[in-house]
Image (spheres, rainbow, N blue to C red):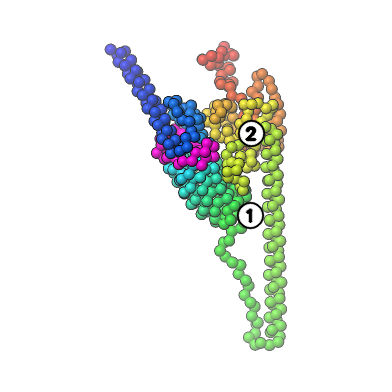
Amino acid sequence: MRLPSSRCLLVFSFLLLVSDLTLAESSDREALLALKSTVDPSNSLPWEGYDFCNWQGIRECLRGRVTKMVVEYLNLTGTLDAASLNRLDQLRVLSFKGNSISGEIPDLSGLTNLKSLFLNDNQFSGYFPSSISDLHRLKVVVLSGNKISGNIPSSLLKLRRLYVLYLQDNRLTGELPPLNQTSLRFFNVSNNKLSGEIPITPALIRFNFSSFSGNLDLCGDQIDRPCSNGTQTQSLPPISPASPINTPSGSSSHRRRRKLVAIIVGSIGGFLLLLICLSLAWRACRRRNAIEGRSKAMEGAAEGGAGEGSGGTGGNNGGKRGGFSWEGEGLGSLVFCGAGDQQMTYSLEDLLKASAETLGRGTMGSTYKAVMESGFIVTVKRLKDSRYPRLDEFRRQMEVLGRLRHPNLVPLRAYFQAKEERLLVYDYFPNGSLFSLIHGNYHYLSPLIS
């Protein structure tokens, strides 16, 4: 009697699992159709049929649930419905970039698994969505090129994994919150109406003028605009004669003292003015050298065959005209090695948007399997110590490694270097580890050592 009971229990569990998966799939399909009814009044999205995982813009499904939705440049003119959007609670990547969606950005608190949010280059208005601060897994927030107003909430400090924050070309006001996430690498709030002093935090101090430009009431060291501390320079009080009797000798002594004070004050003022001029010249030289360095990095990326990013730009060039580009920001470059390949037409943004799986960790860094939206799979190694070797030496070493070709050697396909980030990109080989080659795989590999 025990054996039939066990079989019945197993069959019942299987039927229950199948039932749950069917209900989840049906729920996501209904949520997508409800979302389409509000965001796509002109019927630009051809969402038909039962297999919603193959619908346009649905880039990835996992166990029958939508995990990546990229609906870009389709001239969507409606609004986002919070109820239907929050039912897609397994989303990791959500992008409505380059449409004409209007209204307020809805409450997104139900998207607890979201990692990347791209709503740039639309017609969104209203205040900054406070619900974004509750999405603790969020790494990329791109809301540039809209009409968002109000303050940037200080609750963004709760996003401890924040890597990209692009808010340029909006109507944001108030002061900048003291963002201090050490993970923050890409940041832009230019062309808004922000005011006050730029907070001096380890995260914000690394960004230059282009990340803050176009805010007339903003001040701070990063934009070479000193802040007024509310105090005024006090002038020296007039020197009174030693004697209250107004004699010719007393009047002459008074004039001599005033001349002496004027000479001293003038000398001090001239010295301070000279120091200020030297400081401004030194900062101008630093900025010019930084710009030249970024230009060389971009030229190197172009010669290496790197693809273009497709996000929103920073600085004065942001907005609807181009979208931001990781290389265009001058923050790093993705350089390809060897002869060009049709499959190697991806950019740094494609790597950032790829779903990643940790393959291993070692003394040199961590290794990941990255699956891009196009389905192309690569292996990415993130080096631990990005300070050594120096940029020029690192580039020379990568050029040498990139030329190496051997049947038993996995070729280096591309590399990325920035101030504090270095990545190596290789072809992906399943079970491509020394352990697998030595011990074999019980599915199909024979061990080298028996």
Q: Which residue is mark 2?
A: 307
**Label disc, if present, on residue 224 of the rendered structure:** 1
Q: Residues within 10 Å of mark 2 (few under 14, many from 20)?
A: many
Q: At 60% from the left edge and 69% from the top edge, which residue is drawn?
A: 234
Please identify the dominant SS of the magenta region: loop
On-image quarter of the N terminus: top left
Helix, strand or loop under label 1:
loop
Q: Is residue 83 magenta?
A: yes
Q: Is residue 258 magenta?
A: no
Q: Is residue 409 above or below residue 207?
A: above
Identify the magenta region. Answer: 73-100
Q: Position of residue 437 (x, y in %)?
A: 58, 17
Asked whether, in this view, residue 165 is left or right of residue 298, the answer is left
Quadrant of res 327: top right
**Label disc, if present, on residue 165 of the rendered structure:** none
Residue 4 appears anywhere in the view: yes
Residue 363 appears anywhere in the view: no
Mark 2 in CB contact with mark 1 (< 8 angstroms):
no
Label whose residue precedes the other's in the sequence (2 or 1): 1
Farthest residue in the left direction? Answer: 1
Q: Position of residue 74 (x, y in %)?
A: 52, 36
